Amino acid sequence: MPTRRRPRLRVLIGVLAGVLVLCGGGVAVATWTLVRATDTVGEVDFVRPLAVPPLADSRLDDQGRRVFDLIAREGRRDFRGDGRLTRTAGFDGDFLGPTLRAKRGEQVRVNVVNKLGEETNVHWHGMHLPARMDGGPHQLVRPGATWSPTWRVDQPAATLWYHPHPHGATEEQVYRGLAGMFILDDDREAALPLPRTYGVDDVPVIVQDRSFSRSGQFSKTRNSIASIGVLGDTLLVNGTVGPYLDVRTERVRLRLLNASTARTYNFGLSDDRPFALIGTDGGLLARTARLTRIRLSPGERAEIVVDVRPGERVTLRSTPPDLGIGGLSRRSAGGADRLDVLQLRAASTLTPAPPVPDTLVPVDRLDPSAAATTRTLEFQGRGINGRSMRMDRIDFAATRDTTEVWEVLNSDGTPHNFHVHDVQFQLLSVDGAAPPPELGGWKDTIYLPPHRPMRIVLRFTDHSDPNLPYMYHCHLLWHEDSGMMGQFVVVEPGQAPGRPPTHAGHGEHN
Ligand code: C2O
Ligand code: CU
């Protein structure tokens, strides 16, 4: 009997081995597609003029407030000129929104009208303002309703932005197209010899990655290895696929905004020429930094000035960002990707522009030795300090008029970043070392390389409210939606934190 069984056993083993090889092959192929680097260098046809978001109209009301209207609505757009309409959403249009612009000291009011078929809201990313005006998950606007936050702009000139923030639906709504830029001006910035003609030599560059399904819809397939969210193979800049910008001046200021939901970029120019980094999230730097690359994780901004020569073409490009991780995780998180972003086409005669000054604006350093409290925020899994976001739980209270030091740590092997509402912070150290110049100014969002503690210092000056919290979270929007977010309140000295309202939802009237 055993001898008669042998051949069958062999066949069985052979079949099993074959199945294993096939499966293994399948897994290998699947793995390869998941970790294959996207490389669009030299592959992008720059055939469309870069769309520049219009400056939002505003009017002064009888109280002297600058009033804007923003209407969130659904839309459709043919991004690639092949007749396939992508379902989108935008403010006042099909995709993205107008650029809001206000000056330090002005009182602004924005009428946010929700014409979507679902709840939404608008968060003013990077803005210092009272929690009830912040547009976080507690300020939901029901379909058909209008919410009209108002606040006084009280912070330096900066490139901020706005986007929805309903808990659990932020990724989806931003991905569909709900986002826009919010530029703040002040006298210090205005006194510097910098390019500042909007849409001419001072240009928003809102970078987002998308993949398109066969029917032309935005693909929502998440990379299952990196688990960071959706990474696309096609870049939209201000909603334009394959964009070029006609440059008519010797220097052009680009306001880079990474409005992608998961992808981190490493921006530079195709010939590696240096550019002048003049500002980051919360405003201008004290001194211009001459760099060849700048890494921006989701939510981060950088203002750069690029020198061009008459008649040339040079491409803004993203080369593999240093994510602080290696191997498969790095590749599957986009760490090996190269992407052409925007072609700059210099005219044959260029209007002269003054050199970018080395000294920009005074930046007061916050004093960590004055810190009342030191906190540790550990990002891991889908939570912070082992806890997942809860709308009815305030995680901690900061006291008005105090300075705090936070040690923020990513203890996963995958990318996270850190964003906090209400204040701009300063970085004290990256894994114990002094921060590089691009992280030396005002920041509200920073990349968190795994296992490298980032120490930041923050100061809470005003806008206390014991009940209504501000958020801090990972700005990889899928992580945020899945609970990697927490809530803090700013209280008066001696005041105890209260309770967030059980029912979210403002903006029924106004
Ligand atoms: Cu840009 Cu809490 O968000
Ligand atoms: Cu994250």
Image: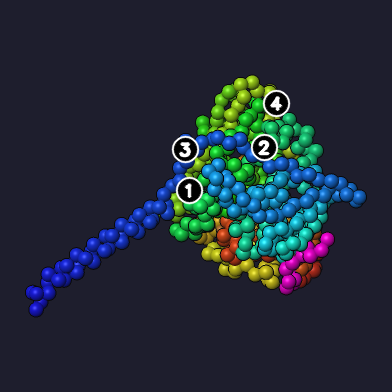
Whole-number angstrom distance, CA of label 4 to CA of label 1:
37 Å
User: In the drawing, does residue 467 fall left or right of residue 268?
Assistant: right
Task: Tell me the tag on residue 43.
Answer: 3
Q: Majority secondary structure of the magenta segment?
A: loop
Q: Residues within 10 Å of mark 3 (few under 14, many from 20)?
A: few
Q: Amino acid at mark 2?
A: Val
Q: Residues within 10 Å of mark 2 (few under 14, many from 20)?
A: many
- In front of the other: 479 or 493: 479
Mark 2 residue CB less than 8 A from any atom of ligand 1:
no
Whole-number angstrom distance, CA of label 3 to CA of label 2:
24 Å
User: Of tags 3 and 2, which is closer to the observer?
Assistant: 3
300 in magenta: no
Task: Tell me the tag on residue 335.
Answer: 1
- In front of the other: 265 or 385: 265
User: Of tags 4 and 2, which is closer to the observer?
Assistant: 2
Task: Tell me the tag on residue 161.
Answer: none
Task: Tell me the tag on residue 354.
Answer: 4
Residue 420 location (% of width, % of height): 67, 56
507 in magenta: yes
User: In the drawing, does residue 412 fall left or right of residue 484?
Assistant: left
Q: Which residue is painted at 78% across and 38% down in the image?
A: 188
Q: Amino acid at mark 1?
A: Gly
Residue that sits furthest to the top in the current view:
349
